[in-house]
Image (tube, rainbow, N blue to C red):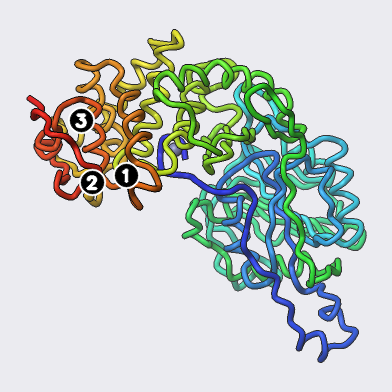
Amino acid sequence: MFGSSKRTKVMGVQFVLAIVHAATLCVFGQSRSALGANRIHCVTDISHEFTFYFDGRFGRNYVGENGINVQNWGTLSKYDFANANLLILQSSSSPCQYTPADISAVRQFIYEGGGVLVLGDYTTFRNEKQYRLNALAKQFKAEFINQKANKPLKGSSFLSDKKIDSYSPKTIKLTRRSGWQVLIADAQSHPVLARRRIGKGMIIVASRALCGHRPDASDPINADWWKPLLVELSAGKPVDPKHRPKNQSPENEMQRDRLPIQYSDYMKPYADAIYGVYDKCFPVIEKVMGVPPSKGMLTKLILLPTGGGGFSSGSAIGLAAWWGDFPEKKYGMVELISHESTHSWVHPFTEPMWNEGIATYVGILVGMEMGLEKDAAATLEGWIKGAKRYDPEMTKYDLAGGKDVPHSVRMAKPMWIFEQLRKEKPDIVARYFQTKRRLATRDSIKKYTAHDSVAVLSIAMGKDLFDWFQSLGITVDRDKAQIKMPTLAANR
Ligand SMILES: [Zn+2]
């Protein structure tokens, strides 16, 4: 992930196996469960807003053993719902529209027996005046509103004896006499979760705050009642349990000069601008890094509908389309592209001490080269200031093996180290990666360690840096490095 923790994954691949209960099929003959109606085939929409949580964590927590969860990254109206019986819709402050085509696809899915869960949390994108998810909710006579729900929340009907947990819920406005049944309300009886039958299917609108949100899925709040509720919601449509529902990738892939760029229809307006920044950044990243990208890396760009960061799977990089107030502001996108590209550049060995720190540092250096010195300098200063709050002398935290290193120190101590070296050799980052590319190969070593990285940096500097690193509290040992240095003078 950009600027906080590592986010490296291969898009849309989930190794969840469909378990076919043959015994159930025999015993129940023609019953609904024999047709597979009790298995959930859930598709979670992350095409209107990408979050790591809805990219699989939601499904793990709330679909779980009751079925399979896949993701829709592409344009919603193009998803093939044939073998799905549950759709999760969610988005927060995203500018992506729920188009008339999306709405009619959702409507048809419900009429055919599908279950739809709409998780909303009223908020608007920048200076927009509307919460996009409402364009869909209103079609079904519901509206997410900007009104806090007052706790305690209370369940009714079959939720009356359940404990209702939540983060910061807001309430939902329902059109009277449109058939909504409120299942959870706040202390003043404002709806927080309601359901409505439509055709053979059902829709539930609910506050997003009734579900977990941690990217590691460690907060499965309300799973005890969400799980059976989702089974019921999906029960109106039989699915074939022998066949998995499908992930849908962003469906547009345009070949550009440097590499293809992949995006959904919603992301189309950003594609040219983001590719344009990438195109300008690429030669500058190459100059800062001193080497071209590693072979087979950086073969595709994927546009993510989020302001929240990106990922690198080595070959593909995902970019948050409205990161750092893009397209109004440019620096953030330059830094993001450089950051995620650096992850692809450092292969085949990720950096043991500064994989994230150096990625952002390269972004800062690229920003400086591209005439965005003010933003770049302010960013660097901010990081180093943040780290010095924990460690004013930069001697306390061990990047090589230390536990509990504060995030800002893990990110910025490497920047500070390279800044010291850059005073003497302004192109030290390039020299470092050139030396690494030459000496750290799959043939020469199995694993690239912190010891190797200081050996490489020493060779690049023309100075033995081990004593200096040790004086900075970093436990590296020149005898443990597999990459051997010639005899070099010590630093300072
Ligand atoms: Zn990163």
Crowding near the residue tagged with mark 1, few <14, some 14–19, many ≥20 C-alpha atoms within 10 Å: some
Residue 388 is marked as 3
Residue 30 placement (x, y as % from top left): 90, 84
Ranked by sequence position, the earlier of labels 3 and 2 is 3
Does the residue at mark 1 contact the one at mark 2 (Cβ under 8 Å)? yes
Residue 163 placement (x, y as % from top left): 55, 67
Amino acid on which the number 3 mark rests in the picture: Lys
Who is closer to the viewer here, 122 or 132? 132
Who is closer to the viewer here, 236 or 447? 447
Ranked by sequence position, the earlier of labels 1 and 3 is 1
Residue 422 placement (x, y as % from top left): 24, 19
Residue in the picture at 62% in, 43% down: 121
For the residues labelled 3 and 2, the Cα–Cα distance comes to 18 Å
Does the residue at mark 3 contact the one at mark 2 (Cβ under 8 Å)? no
Which image quadrant for residue 369?
top left
Q: Is residue 460 left or right of residue 257?
A: left
**Ligand 1 rendered quadrant:** top left
Q: Is residue 359 left or right of residue 118?
A: left
Residue 400 is marked as 2
Q: Nearer the viewer, mark 1 or mark 3?
A: 1
Q: Nearer the viewer, mark 3 or mark 2?
A: 2
Ranked by sequence position, the earlier of labels 1 and 2 is 1
